[in-house]
Amino acid sequence: MSETSDTKTINLLNNGEFQSRDISSNTVLELRTELDIPADSSVNIGGTVRQNDFSLSDGDYVAWTSNNKVGG
């Protein structure tokens, strides 16, 4: 069995709403590169902070937050 496409669809938080987005990444580290997510940002999958080696699945809910926020 051969796959013709390695893409998966995630639900990415954007401006307060989750939006479907097709990605080719398999791990959080690959997603950081694909979406230009800064290395010092936290990546949440399904509401849990995940490390770079975490494997992504089709349908995951993904949000990332910058850790350099200041003010209140």
Image (cartoon, rainbow, N blue to C red):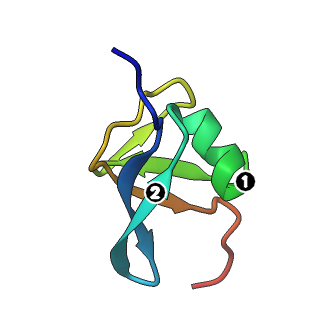
> Which quadrant holds residue 69?
bottom right
Residue drawn 63% across the image and 62% down it: 66
Mark sitting on residue 38: 1
Is disc 2 placed on a helix, strand or loop? strand
Vertical side of 4 occupied by 13: above or below: below
Within-10-Å neighbours for mark 1: few <14, some 14–19, many 20+: some
Residue drawn 37% across the image and 53% down it: 9
Mark sitting on residue 65: none
Quadrant placement of the C terminus: bottom right
Residue 28: x and y in percent read 54, 37
Amino acid bearing label 1: Pro
Vertical side of 56 occupied by 48: above or below: below
Q: Earlier in the sequence, mark 1 or mark 2?
A: 2
Vertical side of 45 occupied by 57: above or below: above
Residue 37: x and y in percent read 67, 55
Amino acid bearing label 2: Asp
Q: Which residue is mark 2?
A: 22
Residue drawn 65% across the image and 57% down it: 35
Quadrant placement of the N terminus: top left
> Which quadrant holds residue 8?
top left
Is disc 1 placed on a helix, strand or loop? loop
Within-10-Å neighbours for mark 2: few <14, some 14–19, many 20+: few
Residue drawn 40% across the image and 19% down it: 2
Q: How far is the residue under mark 1 from the one under mark 2? A: 20 Å
Closer-to-camera residue (1/32): 1
